[in-house]
Image (cartoon, helix red, strand yellow):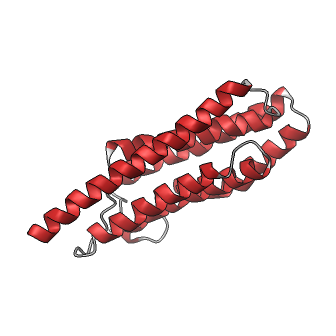
């Protein structure tokens, strides 16, 4: 019965990501102007709170019996909003190339479309994940956090070849995750057709 409420504690945890996203961007910008230990620490601290919001909202919802389809959708929307808004800002500031937010957006779009397609016969929402996709999501957060701190320190956190290697590794893993997801989707689609 509690899961029917439009707002619950798990939703509040999810909302933290949306509320803190503009604050996080302001913290990065202030630190870029004049990096100090306090300003860079603020960027790191906000990122930890945002990550904790993402980590704990699902377990809290399940523990309190508040898990719902709406909560799953809201969680995913909060994730992609935080990631794409932050990565777009980092692209604008020259820290991240344009193809990183594009790849993250494409991977999320693929996840959304094939989840919708595979669950279209069902009345319940089926968000279809796989281990590689899960780790791509973790990498999206880690990469975004590292590059945000890199920007906050005027791109002095990671030496030149290391920052580029991280970006290419991130991009390559997203392509791998999309390829594996497409393969999984094609297999699942064949199973649906044959049954």
Along the horizontal axis of the image, is 134 left or right of 89? left
Q: Residue at x 50, y 41 (%)?
A: 172
Along the horizontal axis of the image, is 92 left or right of 72? right
| Whether residue 110 is visible | yes
Q: Residue furthest left?
A: 195
Q: Where is 168 relative to 127, above or below?
A: above
Q: Quadrant of residue 27?
A: top right
Most foreground residue, 135 or 12? 135
Image quadrant in which the N terminus is located: bottom left
Residue 150 x/y as whole percent: 73, 33
Q: Quadrant of residue 123?
A: bottom left
Most foreground residue, 87 or 186? 186
Q: Residue at x 40, y 46 (%)?
A: 177
Image quadrant in which the C terminus is located: bottom left
Residue 56 x/y as whole percent: 46, 45
Most foreground residue, 52 or 170? 170
Residue 175 x/y as whole percent: 46, 47
Q: Residue furthest right?
A: 34
Q: Residue at x 61, y 37 (%)?
A: 167
- Count the numbered circles shown: 0
Along the horizontal axis of the image, is 116 left or right of 169? left
Q: Residue at x 16, y 68 (%)?
A: 192
Most foreground residue, 105 or 37? 105
Q: Where is 2 relative to 167, above or below?
A: below
Q: Where is 177 relative to 106, above or below?
A: above
Residue 141 x/y as whole percent: 56, 42
| Whether residue 71 is visible | no
């Amino acid at each position: 019965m509690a899961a029917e409420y439009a707002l619950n504690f798990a939703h509040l945890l999810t909302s933290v990501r949306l509320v803190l996203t503009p604050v996080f961007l302001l913290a990065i910008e202030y630190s870029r102007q004049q990096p100090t230990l306090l300003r860079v620490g603020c960027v790191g601290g906000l990122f930890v709170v945002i990550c904790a919001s993402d980590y704990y909202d699902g377990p809290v919802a399940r523990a309190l019996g508040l898990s719902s389809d709406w909560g799953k959708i809201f969680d995913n929307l909060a994730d992609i909003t935080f990631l794409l808004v932050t990565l777009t800002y980092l692209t604008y500031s020259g820290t991240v190339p344009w193809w990183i937010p594009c790849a993250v957006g494409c991977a999320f779009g693929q996840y959304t479309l094939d989840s919708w397609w595979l669950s279209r016969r069902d009345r319940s929402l089926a968000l279809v994940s796989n281990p590689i996709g899960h780790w791509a999501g973790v990498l999206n957060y880690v990469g975004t956090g590292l590059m945000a701190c890199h920007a906050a320190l005027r791109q002095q956190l990671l030496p030149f070849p290391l920052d580029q290697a991280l970006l290419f590794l991130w991009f390559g893993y997203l392509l791998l995750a999309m390829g594996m997801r497409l393969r999984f989707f094609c297999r699942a689609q064949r199973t649906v057709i044959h049954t």
